[in-house]
Image (cartoon, helix red, strand yellow):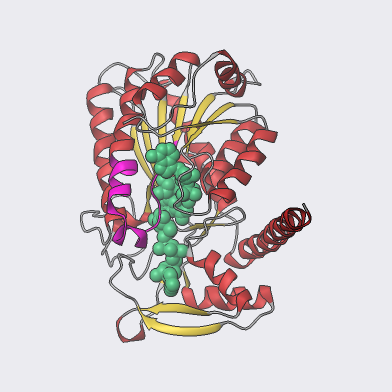
């Protein structure tokens, strides 16, 4: 399926080459899909900062405010990262990108995220998380050199498991949502490409990532907005008022885990191995190991915002959410040197500072644009 007519031509190719140019001898050339997204923007910026060549790809879909994605794009643009506008399902575009630059690593973060949205738009999860993943793996398989692929799975694959903390070897065959099912399918699909084509593949199971430039569909983000507006926030509870909690993980910790996974992916196979059976297939939990209840999340926000929330405690609807997540991160600690350091309180403090700054700036920009259009 082709959805991106806006690529090709010498000027476009020049931008692609310049963005992917490696600035340090030790650097890698990384294609970051979903680069206009929350995690993608932070990872792309970190890779660029340390001297890697970084090229982005994103379709800027309207799942949430595209202006926020454009603002992230502007930030990356200033850092020298070009985001190609297109869909990961566009096989011709992917082929072209791999033809124009020798990509050593793909950091695949483009996906339809969000658990509850699958109730209203199931097709978008199949399009991006299943078909889109296959398209990326097909392109990686065919590329020369073959890149190592690091991609985002999700803590949601642990589904209805009640044994905590979740370890990578635990069962993942009882997803609670279509989102989780597509991430689980992604892990199985990735295994096939490792098995048949010898692609080096690392799956990262992120646990509820939050922070500046975050996603407006996530609870911490819209709770902040609603608390400030005096609107009620719904705090979900399990059966018999049981606590609903998450292993909230701060974005900087996740970024360090992603960068370490890129480096580790290259260690044993260079830029991937075409010889059958040589390349690694790995899965790691990237969490924070300290679950916090949604109710405590709201209390921290009240404290930071200095505003009392209007709280409604409601029984968790059957919407695909699970009651509790908690990561065992021993494997990532051992193999990636992953050590999350940010408490929910200090991470939310940084988020709140960003949120107030971002929305006051964009609201005043909007107001002055309205003023201009009234006076003209
Ligand atoms: N943020 C979290 O808490 C969290 C937790 C677990 C897993 N993940 C996974 O991490 C990855 C990044 O998540 P995020 O929070 O940054 O989400 P995000 O929605 O902010 O970023 C995803 C980006 O991918 C783009 N995209 C979606 N479908 C595309 C397609 N078909 N073609 C091209 N671009 C497409 C979107 O426009 C978006 O900019 C996703 O794979 C997500 O499932 C996120
Ligand atoms: O780690 C993941 O794999 C996932 O992380 C994230 O999902 P979740 O952990 O569900 O985050 P999020 O929606 O912020 O809800 C947080 C908490 O608030 C509760 N919640 C939610 C809404 C509400 O109105 N009330 C409420 O109590 C809700 O029940 C939950 O307990 C990503 O969005 C997702 O893309 C996925 O990748």
Count of marks overlaid on the render? 0
Q: Give the range drawn in magenta.
A: 108-130
* Displayed quadrant of residue 359: bottom right
Estimate the x, y position of residue 248 in percent, counting from the top left: 49, 62
Above or below 284: residue 161:
below
Estimate the x, y position of residue 215 in percent, counting from the top left: 52, 56
* Residue at the (40%, 31%) spot, across then down: 149
Queried whether the magenta region covers residue 110, the answer comes back as: yes
Residue extending farthest front: 376
Above or below 233: residue 63:
above
The front one of 16 and 22 is 16
Queried whether the magenta region covers residue 28, the answer comes back as: no
* Residue at the (48%, 67%) spot, across then down: 219
Above or below 356: residue 41:
above
Residue 333 shows up from this direction: no
* Displayed quadrant of residue 21: top right
* Residue at the (66%, 80%) spot, across then down: 307
Estimate the x, y position of residue 112 in percent, counting from the top left: 38, 48
- Using residue 160 as the reference point, say whether residue 2 is left or right of it: right
- Using residue 183 as the reference point, say whether residue 286 is left or right of it: right
The front one of 131 and 147 is 131
Above or below 248: residue 145:
above
- Using residue 169 as the reference point, say whether residue 298 is left or right of it: right
* Residue at the (63%, 46%) spot, across then down: 71
Residue 96 shows up from this direction: yes
Q: In which quarter of the image is the N terminus?
A: top left
Estimate the x, y position of residue 82 in percent, counting from the top left: 59, 29
């Amino acid at each position: 399926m082709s959805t991106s007519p806006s690529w090709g031509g010498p000027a476009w190719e020049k931008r692609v080459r310049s963005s992917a140019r490696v600035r340090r001898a030790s650097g890698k050339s990384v294609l970051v899909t979903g680069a206009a997204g929350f995690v993608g923007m932070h990872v792309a910026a970190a890779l660029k900062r340390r001297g890697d060549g970084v090229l982005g790809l994103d379709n800027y879909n309207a799942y949430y405010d595209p202006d926020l994605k454009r603002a992230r794009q502007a930030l990356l643009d200033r850092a020298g990262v070009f985001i190609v506008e297109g869909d990961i399902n566009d096989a011709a575009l992917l082929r072209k990108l791999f033809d124009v630059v020798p990509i050593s690593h793909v950091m695949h973060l483009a996906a339809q995220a969000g658990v509850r949205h699958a109730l209203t738009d199931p097709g978008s999860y199949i399009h991006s998380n299943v078909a889109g993943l296959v398209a990326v793996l097909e392109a990686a398989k065919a590329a020369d050199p073959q890149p190592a692929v690091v991609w985002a799975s999700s803590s949601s694959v642990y589904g209805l498991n009640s044994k905590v903390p979740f370890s990578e070897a635990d069962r993942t065959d009882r997803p609670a949502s279509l989102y989780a099912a597509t991430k689980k399918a992604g892990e199985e699909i990735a295994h096939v490409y490792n098995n048949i084509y010898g692609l080096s593949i690392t799956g990262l199971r992120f646990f509820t990532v939050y922070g500046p430039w975050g996603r407006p569909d996530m609870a911490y983000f819209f709770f902040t907005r609603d608390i400030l507006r005096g609107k009620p926030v719904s705090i979900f509870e399990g059966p018999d008022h049981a606590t609903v909690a998450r292993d909230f993980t701060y974005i900087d910790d996740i970024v360090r885990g992603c960068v370490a996974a890129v480096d580790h992916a290259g260690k044993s196979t260079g830029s991937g191995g075409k010889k059958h059976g040589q390349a690694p297939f790995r899965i790691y939990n990237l969490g924070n190991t300290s679950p916090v209840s949604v109710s405590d999340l709201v209390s921290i926000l009240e404290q930071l915002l200095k505003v009392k929330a209007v709280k409604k405690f409601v029984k968790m609807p059957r919407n695909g959410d699970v009651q509790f997540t908690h990561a065992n991160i021993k494997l990532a600690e051992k193999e990636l040197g992953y050590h999350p350091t940010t408490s929910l309180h200090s991470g939310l403090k940084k988020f709140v500072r960003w949120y107030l700054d971002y929305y006051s700036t964009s609201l005043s920009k909007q107001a002055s644009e309205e003023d201009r259009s009234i006076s003209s």
